[in-house]
Amino acid sequence: MAAITTKYSSYFGLIVAFSIFSLSGVFLKSIYGMSIGSVIYYRLIFGLLTLLLFMALTGKLDELFITKKKKYIFLMGCTNTLMIYAYFSAIKYVGISTAVLLLYTAPVYVTILSPILLKENINVRDMIALLLSVMGILIAIHPGEHVTPQINGLYKVGIILGLLSGISYAFSNISYRYLRDTYSSTALLFWPNVVSLVLLSPYASRVSPNILAMNIEELLLFGIIMTTFGSLLYYRSAKYVKIQNISVISLVEPVAAMFFGYLFLHERIFAHTIEGCACILTGVVLIGIKSNTNPVDNMQHICFYKDGRQRYVQLLYKFQRKFGTVLENLKR
């Protein structure tokens, strides 16, 4: 009974977390006079300070101690930074609806790269999902009528940034899956954000004190709700839910983001956006619900040795298994 309760509470936690993430565009557009880099920097500052306070109060600061795989944590921080910067910039140019759909094309890139980098075959389901997602992208990015050449140029920049956010999101997920059996969820939330903070530190001085004071409440809420509460809820809930189910539940975010954009910012939702949304999300579902060989828990445990130490890595897909092998070969 306890296991069932944990399972359902984890599903609920994920739904709440993705709903919180869908508010990113609303928070972003409520901040004035600051560049994208500065917004992300101060959001991270307040979020990390809140996280440190939470860890101190709960006596879990020891979970932040890291000893190995540091370069992969750094890589995760770099891809996270690129993802959030590109995503927020895309929102600025093309709006929330299109930007969030392009962010959620990440599974498409994993499917494309698998046969190239990992020598994996693409089955019929993958091809259908890939075609649906590509078709959805082409439909969703249609700029509509009465668009001036100048606006059309900025729109194309936004589309490129949106696609870049999806690609970097895919690599961030791969890094997280490789590291999650080594470190706690709080460590994988804290240290990549520290890397992002360092990379974005030049933006700290690009905001005048008056502008910062004017936006301080929004930045505080942005950091606490998104960086700390939403992310902690996601990482702690995701531990008890299968990866393919998380892929399906995550579709709450793009749908909710479009709804909140319409509700709070009065962004128009075009018919072609809805059509593209349906195609992209159907493709993501097809990729996410692949059947695994083990119907009980869809999980395989792989044991391997390095420098006389045994390490256990839980990988939920063949993709993760081969990716871990590639990384270990690189380290040798």
Image (spheres, grey):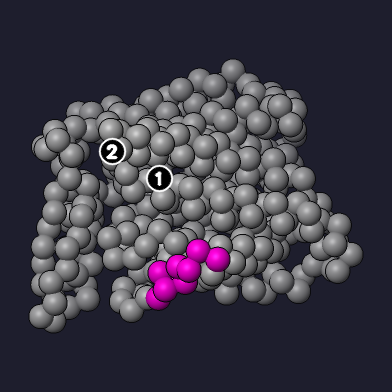
| Horizontal relation, residue 267 to residue 133: left or right | right
Camera-side residue of 88 and 63: 63
User: SS class of the residue under badge 2?
Assistant: helix
* Residue 188 % position (x, y): 42, 63
Most distant residue in the bottom direction: 307
Residue 247 in sight from this viewpoint: no
Which residue is depicted at the point 75% across and 51% down?
218
Quarter of the image where one finds residue 76: bottom left
Q: Which residue is mark 2?
A: 3
The amino acid at mark 1 is Ser
* Residue 171 % position (x, y): 38, 55
Which residue is depicted at the point 36% across and 57% down?
176
Which residue is depicted at the point 45% across and 34% down?
12
What residue span does the magenta drawing correspond to? 57-65
| Horizontal relation, residue 133 to residue 293: left or right | right
Camera-side residue of 262 and 60: 60
Most distant residue in the top direction: 271
The amino acid at mark 2 is Ala
Gap in angstroms between the C-alphas marked 1 and 2 = 13 Å
Most distant residue in the front direction: 1
Residue 330 is covered by the magenta coloring: no
Q: Which residue is mark 1?
A: 237
